[in-house]
Image (cartoon, rainbow, N blue to C red):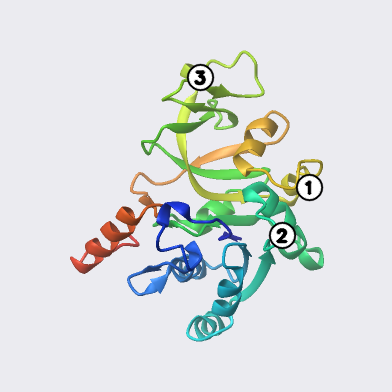
Amino acid sequence: MIFAAGLGTRLAPLTDDKPKALVELNGRSLLWHVAERLAEEGFRSLTINVHHFAEQIKDYVVSPPFAEYAVQKGLHIAISDESEQLLDTGGGLRKAMPLLFADGDDSPVLIHNVDIMSNANLAELYENAEGVDALLLVSERKTSRYFLFNDEMRLVGWQNIETGEVRSPYPDLEADKCRRLAFSGIHVVSKGLVEAMQGWPDKFGITDFYIKSCRDLNIRGYVQQESLKLVDIGKIEVLKALENASQNGCDTKH
């Protein structure tokens, strides 16, 4: 599933007349770049949630040249439409459940934010998600907000190191004794985890769900190779930096 419903406010004014997913990097949309990475890793069934300029994305995936690329790669594209209400990441995942687990298919689902570029081994992440409710790709990337994991890499909480705020279902959790790792926006979830979202409000963030549910569900972190490179294209300056790197002969994908 590609999360593409967000408003993309940090990329304004580029997103004043188009969705974040259709902002271009080196002549191709962010959606195309993510779909290409997923196809390279062997994923063929893609569900895309839409809200901001939803019709543009709907038209884009059925029109050349993207539609021709999808046919060439054998991609099956489904749209989870949130036009009436933006449901955030948790609500969006739950709404897409009938599409993700159609025809009795209970296979886990890999989730990828549309504005994340990386050289992550997505197939490896997916293969290691067997037997858990969620597997989160994490790293030691510097940020202000971290997931907290115990020695077995089980999620136990969250911390904002700038404010000192700690959130956890474990009242006696000692954050300094936990492993702090940054979330990549790439994760694999089971059907059971999505079913556990029943009873939550229509709109909620998946991070909030993970933090509140980690005591009852088996949610784990996964650290990949040390050479993992990941870029969050949330700001125009980051987008321009990637384009400049490409023009100077650097590979923006690896």
Residue 211 in the figure: left or right of residue 139: right
Identify the residue position indicated by label 3 in the image: 175
- Indicate the amino acid at tag 3: Ala
Distance between the Cα atoms at labels 2 and 3? Answer: 34 Å
Using a 10 Å C-alpha cutoff, classify the residue at mark 2 as few (fewer than 14 neighbours), some (14 to 19) or many (20 or more).
many
Identify the residue position indicated by label 1 in the image: 195
Identify the residue position indicated by label 2 in the image: 96
Using a 10 Å C-alpha cutoff, classify the residue at mark 1 as few (fewer than 14 neighbours), some (14 to 19) or many (20 or more).
few
Q: Residue at x 60, y 56 (%)?
A: 110
**111, above or below 147, in the image:** below
Q: Quadrant of the C terminus?
A: bottom left
Using a 10 Å C-alpha cutoff, classify the residue at mark 3 as few (fewer than 14 neighbours), some (14 to 19) or many (20 or more).
many
Residue 120 in the figure: left or right of residue 249: right
Toward the viewer: 130 or 231?
A: 231
Distance between the Cα atoms at labels 1 and 2? Answer: 12 Å
**x, y (%) of residue 134?**
64, 44
Q: Nearer the viewer, mark 1 or mark 2?
A: 2
Q: Residue at x 56, y 77 (%)?
A: 61
Q: Are marks 2 and 3 in contact (CB under 8 Å)?
A: no
Q: Quadrant of the N terminus?
A: bottom right
Q: Nearer the viewer, mark 2 or mark 3?
A: 2
Q: Residue at x 43, y 51 (%)?
A: 10
Judged from the image, the secondary structure of the residue bearing numbered disc 3 is helix
Judged from the image, the secondary structure of the residue bearing numbered disc 2 is loop
Residue farthest toward the top in the current orientation of the protein: 172
**x, y (%) of residue 221?**
54, 38
For residue 30, the mark is: none
